[in-house]
Amino acid sequence: MAITFQSPMKLSFITSNGFSNPPSLYPINTHFSFGFNLSSVSSKTQTHITIPEPEPVFTSVKSFAPATVANLGPGFDFLGCAVDGVGDFVTLRVDPNVKAGEVSISDISGAGNKLSKDPLSNCAGIAAISVMKMLNIQSVGLSISLEKGLPLGSGLGSSAASAAAAAVAVNEIFGRKLSVDDLVLAGLESETKVSGYHADNIAPSIMGGFVLIRSYDPLELIPLKFPFEKDLFFVLVNPEFEAPTKKMRAVLPSEVTMSHHIWNCSQAGALVAAILQGDSRGLGKALSSDKIVEPRRGPLIPGMEGVKKAALKAGAFGCTISGAGPTLVAVTDDEERGREIGERMVEAFMKEGNLKALAMVKKLDRVGARLVSSNS
Amino acid sequence: MAITFQSPMKLSFITSNGFSNPPSLYPINTHFSFGFNLSSVSSKTQTHITIPEPEPVFTSVKSFAPATVANLGPGFDFLGCAVDGVGDFVTLRVDPNVKAGEVSISDISGAGNKLSKDPLSNCAGIAAISVMKMLNIQSVGLSISLEKGLPLGSGLGSSAASAAAAAVAVNEIFGRKLSVDDLVLAGLESETKVSGYHADNIAPSIMGGFVLIRSYDPLELIPLKFPFEKDLFFVLVNPEFEAPTKKMRAVLPSEVTMSHHIWNCSQAGALVAAILQGDSRGLGKALSSDKIVEPRRGPLIPGMEGVKKAALKAGAFGCTISGAGPTLVAVTDDEERGREIGERMVEAFMKEGNLKALAMVKKLDRVGARLVSSNS
């Protein structure tokens, strides 16, 4: 089979231990693994490989991608996980009214009525286009219907869920030619344009479970399996408050003290150990232990400190900010206890921050973005 | 049974999530678990418990404690592991010529002829005294014969191995009354006086395997089990060079950039994941990836950069400084390959740093400090 592939990005198979600060544009030298066995390609040569344009195997598909909790305290900027039962749906159709090789967004429902329908400005649109380019789609036009189950700017990976659902939908409609890594890269392109160059939402939304982002150049993802037989519940409490994104970024320090660095590093290690050992108590403790980001971002969320205290008092193993907030995440190993924790947190948000809030108790999503239905 | 206990330290059972910078003296509020079930003791009350003075169950014992590799790249100051087949021996005797309740050091052999025989200045002596105080030994005098298998100042936890062997010997001769945590605390007292307040050598020397130091106040240790069925070999290359300890400390930065912090944190997480997943390749990669400490300390070890390159070229999965050096540690999953890597590293030390060096290939020690023999 002739393998032809044209990427929207310059392709190079350069393995490197190097890590640079997140670039403002998409990285040029990204390690791809395109589902084909390319291991024989020299790691030092730049190789362009083309695959023949695949035909759609369905006329329409519906996909789902879960919400995600990124950062996880000391896992700031490199760790995230997917939560079950809440996320975005994409219905994708082969649409003869759409110009071949292009995507249109026909409608957006749910919590996304502020979103642009311009596919170049919409996270689902950008991810869909990225996957179409990876697949070299030139003969078919697609239309997207996006159903937002996640509020925007909540800190639950709303943009990543849309991008993940769209990327998976395009891949499925053309017969699932791309690997998970490719879909993450497509989603990362969307994230870069919409919310910043970070994979700690998009990777777990696509892959499910906990994912550690080891490096970006090359992109290297480490799935961390929380044991099946262990219980873990996330209490997600979303206040009616728009987190001031710019401020949330501005308060991050440019430098951290060595002692705080060592502390957060050891807690990051403890967090990874707790995940792999299925130790929900240790996981919560690590989650709660960030001395670098939470102390600076917390005060920007009215009542945050009091809500965290209320969560711990109600028996949560730990509590921190989900993503850049304003949603707070607490963890427990008991669903009923989780509901109680949620109630106490909602009360505390009102009492301490004068904010209405909604709580939900969710399991870990272990599957990630997936096909929900398809029509031939 | 009446439980009586007098500690050399003020005892308090205060659980706390707090972490303070390493204190210059032994921490007052240290969480003890003395092998007895003290869980009913209120965590908010300071309680002094005395145990009856135990009698010796042997007239002499011989113990062994393994060498350790601390720091492990991004695991700086909170992660260490024990290596098999190299370490220190302590022979401990009930000695009527030694004043009751005291310890003398009768002789030191092997690589330790520079060491003081004053038990208050010798790491084995300090640890032995600490354990005797924990056990409330007032009626028996002990003498120590120390056999150093480890060169001093090598970066292989020489002082910790002596302290660990002594602590275990005293505990064994009195019928093993103390828990592993207690022995680590006794060893930590020794380390504090001799080489600094850090447990990343003493904990793995006593416990074996990989150990993550999660916090000091209370002391909380997380054993990280590298799977039995997986192979892991350490190539330890010790050059004839005295690492300038003061300079090694002085070059540590007081602050690190946020991007380096995030990078090292993610590598620390990847390192923990690699250990628990038995991924020796990933372990080596993480070991090699430190952007904060190794770049500053490496240049103080002549030829270090070239030796690391030679190790990687010879197939090592990773290479970094062991402890504060000058020993370098590389990892592989094949013993024969390990020997080749060691040879290339020794050659490179001569070529790049004009230093003679010795290489050894060692497995992980999974047992930790132990009784070797005893006489009733």
Image (tube, coloured by chain):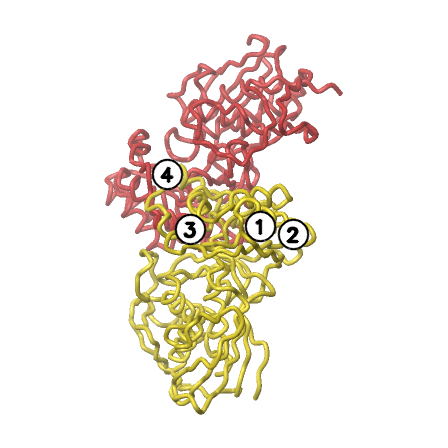
Chain colours: A yellow, B red
Question: Mark 2 and mark 1 in contact (Cβ < 8 Å)?
Answer: yes
Whether residue A281 is visible to the viewer of this picture, yes or no, is yes
The relative height of residue B19 versus residue B275 in the rendered view (above or below) is: above
The residue carrying pointer 1 sits among few (fewer than 14), some (14 to 19) or many (20 or more) residues within 10 Å by Cα, namely many
Q: Respond whether the residues carrying marks 1 and 4 are from the same subunit.
A: yes
Q: Respond whether the residues carrying marks 3 and 1 are from the same subunit.
A: no
Quadrant assignment, res A265: top left
Residue flagged by tag 1: what amino acid is it? Ala
Q: Name the residue under label 2.
A: A338
Sooner in the amino-acid sequence: mark 1 or mark 4: 4
Whether residue B334 is visible to the viewer of this picture, yes or no, is no
Mark 2 or 4: the one toward you: 2
The x and y percentages for residue A166 are 47, 75
The x and y percentages for residue B139 are 63, 10
Residue flagged by tag 3: what amino acid is it? Gln
SS category of the residue bearing label 1: strand
Quadrant assignment, res B40: top right
The residue carrying pointer 3 sits among few (fewer than 14), some (14 to 19) or many (20 or more) residues within 10 Å by Cα, namely many
Sooner in the amino-acid sequence: mark 1 or mark 2: 1
Q: Check the picture and name the quadrant holding the C terminus of chain A.
A: bottom right
> What's the chain of the residue with tag 2?
A
SS category of the residue bearing label 4: helix
SS category of the residue bearing label 3: helix
- Residue at image x 35%, y 66%? A30
Q: Name the residue under label 3.
A: B267
Question: Mark 1 and mark 3 in contact (Cβ < 8 Å)?
Answer: no
Quadrant assignment, res B110: top left
Task: Determine the CA span between mark 1 and mark 2.
Answer: 8 Å
Question: Which numbered disc covers residue B284?
Answer: none
Question: Which numbered disc covers residue A258?
Answer: 4
> What's the chain of the residue with tag 3?
B
Residue flagged by tag 2: what amino acid is it? Gly
